[in-house]
Amino acid sequence: MEAKIEFIASGSITSPQGFHAGATYAGINKKAKYGLDLGILFSEAPCVATALFTNNRIKAAPVVLCQQRLQAGRALAVVVNSGCANACTGEQGLADAAEMAELAADGIGISPEDVLVASTGVIGLPLPMKAIRAGIDQIALSIDGGHELARAMMTTDTLPKEAAVAVRIGDSKFIIGGVAKGSGMIHPDLATLLCLLTTDAAVDIDFLKLALREAVALSFNMISIDGDTSPNDMVLIMANGLVGNEVILQDTSQTSAFQQALDQVCIYLAKCIARDGEGASKLIGVTVSGAPSVAEARLAARTVVSSPLVKAAIHGSNPNWGRIMAAVGRCGVEIVESKIDLYIGQVCLVRSGKPLPFSKRSLVEVLSRSEVPISLQLNLGTATATAWGCDLSEEYVTINSQYTT
Amino acid sequence: MEAKIEFIASGSITSPQGFHAGATYAGINKKAKYGLDLGILFSEAPCVATALFTNNRIKAAPVVLCQQRLQAGRALAVVVNSGCANACTGEQGLADAAEMAELAADGIGISPEDVLVASTGVIGLPLPMKAIRAGIDQIALSIDGGHELARAMMTTDTLPKEAAVAVRIGDSKFIIGGVAKGSGMIHPDLATLLCLLTTDAAVDIDFLKLALREAVALSFNMISIDGDTSPNDMVLIMANGLVGNEVILQDTSQTSAFQQALDQVCIYLAKCIARDGEGASKLIGVTVSGAPSVAEARLAARTVVSSPLVKAAIHGSNPNWGRIMAAVGRCGVEIVESKIDLYIGQVCLVRSGKPLPFSKRSLVEVLSRSEVPISLQLNLGTATATAWGCDLSEEYVTINSQYTT
């Protein structure tokens, strides 16, 4: 069955039916750009829910809490703060995360066990529980509140990152919404600090787990900002089934439409994170084709987009293409130099491993745009992948040498 | 037998007997800081020689040439240039490297097969052979010429990097000299662009291979500047045996002295490279102890010293120690958060995984020094390793966004 997938103007995580959100300023994040640092997402109907978490061995307290609570595969709400990561905070951190869930649960009038917690910000500081206790009561939930929550999650992000797509398939219609934050400590190993996804479709929990893993493989695991990963990384999806569709399983008529729509939301949000990387002025897209396998295509694309030297050269619109070859050469894929073709935009720089004469002016023009597409054809097989990242600027260093406890 | 190992004041690769070197300005490297860009190292007596090369799948022409010639395990001379890497240059690059060796051989009066080639600089440009043909005749070799060669190898290095140690053991005495260059595209996978080592000891080629591999594991494979690696990386050692010692084999009385001395020269040069990383103002040393194995200790130490966020925080003398925990958490070693102790200098920040109160003033004072020692005790085993790197500054980005073809 043919599906129609369309982005919704000003879409957010409260675009799907039955999701409410809101935020306030509790005083946790002194640098909150929109004056918001504490928010809640709530579904009026029970959700099946699943998440992917950081692979970092240092896990923030809210990650530990969510991993325990999501074993049941369901959730009703998430409480989120910026300004403090509640990571490396020991037993007290776990107690604080649990209390934060309890405070949110009391306000909404649900069981604490149905509330998840997400935190982002400085590592190693205790959560300012007094501020959270006072702030949480101020949060008013509404069906337009997704935009507020998107802003309350921001740390060094310069822009909120949210989207929603409407999916029509036959007589059925459902929506998937999402919100994410960057914008440093980002590398392909679940490369986001936080992403919340919502849908009003009814989805089987086992399929939902597979679908989320697949969407993340194409999106959050294909972006890099700086090669670091965070103890707080989490991508969560909640499905409340309010549209009353037949439950989407692994092989039903709506399976592929749901997967495509979820992929699109995740790729859109991942690109937002890459574009808004700390200090970034350009989005870099690296497409590797002709790889022996998808895993190798992904590895090669991620390696090039993560190279500090490639990133710095693009920042300066510097036609130093040799760094792209050096980066793909060290990626671990058994590439063959004499088979490689390299393009930046439409400019072919290398064909069958040989450098071609090129117009420096044309290349500098391509490198000066806000989106720089790099294409590597390995000519070894048929697999393709794209990774996204950003340029490396002096401002990245300034932000991160001053970001302070 | 007890050995005495001492660094020689103003030591160089021509400190060991019978090694001669010299350099000139051929016009290859327009930015040559000391007005030198082409040099030769020559041993008056036949050498056994071995090298370790880049693991990058893109290999510069001189690397391909050296790999072929060193199969015989011997060499008499090396010709080196900066300003052009002769990488990604196809068949022409191989022909140019061979001609460069031939020109040097003709000047010295030896067979081209006994001459090795090393190049460093911009990738993807052909070697300016006209300049090299004219320049190579200008090189005058001398026993003090090591210092000139050290300068001719420099690209973005701000300082030449050279050393020599004298080893006395019983009645025997020999010298090991070395020269290296950085200072970007440096990561632990043979982390140097070029390193040449010389000794007047007689050394068995099989032991020499093992000894070089061991010394590199402790030195050039334990430094990181930016996570990139180069198609030109090479660490070469030449031993001419002129002191007339009994040939050092794997289990002779001088074996351990030779290994220790070689380790010391390589660690010294590796630290010089880390300290002089592009844009660097500080040397960072990360020691991981209590690891289950040496391989894991090395991995953890390298991961922390390579973290852009740790490097940027140290640049700003910013007491954001949580980033060190986040970096060790993602290193791949099965660490246990509740067992970790973390020190920066003498300041203990984490004990058994719990953050301790600390004097911010004391910590900022330690972070402001030119050498910042970080110590992580994993409390999982007995293995230890140290890695070195540098801070990440705005200037690193400026250098690399403008370094131009």
Image (spheres, coloured by chain):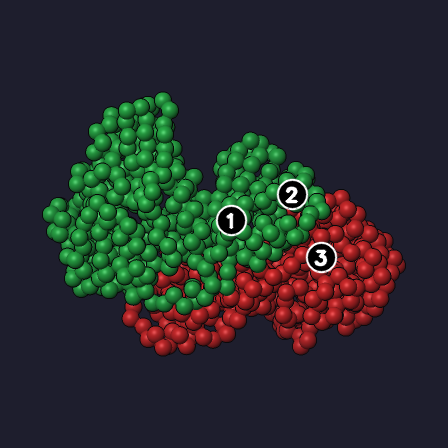
Chain colours: A green, B red
Q: Which mark is residue A33?
A: none
Q: Amino acid at mark 3?
A: Cys
The residue that mark 3 highlights is B84
C-alpha span from label 3 to label 2: 22 Å
Q: Position of residue B330 (x, y in %)?
A: 41, 52
Q: Amino acid at mark 1?
A: Glu
Task: Name the element at disc 1.
Answer: strand
Q: Name the side, left or right, on which A48 lies relative to A312.
A: left
Q: Residues within 10 Å of mark 3 (few under 14, many from 20)?
A: many
Q: Name the side, left or right, on which A209 lies relative to B344.
A: left
Asked if the residue under mark 1 is in contact with the one under mark 2, i.e. CB atoms within 8 Å, the reply is no
Residue at image position (76%, 58%) is B78
The quadrant where residue B139 appears: bottom right
The residue that mark 2 highlights is A348
Task: Name the element at disc 3.
Answer: strand
Asked if the residue under mark 2 is in contact with the one under mark 3, i.e. CB atoms within 8 Å, the reply is no
Residue at image position (38%, 65%) is A403
Q: Is residue A375 above or below residue B232?
A: above
C-alpha span from label 2 to label 1: 17 Å
Closest to the camera, between mark 3 and mark 1, is 1
The quadrant where residue A276 appears: bottom left
Q: Position of residue B307 (x, y in %)?
A: 46, 59
The residue that mark 1 highlights is A371
Residue at image position (32%, 45%) is A10
Same-chain check, marks 2 and 1? yes
Q: Position of residue B328 (x, y in %)?
A: 41, 57
The answer to which of A360 and B230 lies nearer the viewer is A360
C-alpha span from label 3 to label 1: 30 Å
Q: Earlier in the sequence, mark 2 or mark 1?
A: 2
Residue B182 visible from this viewpoint: yes
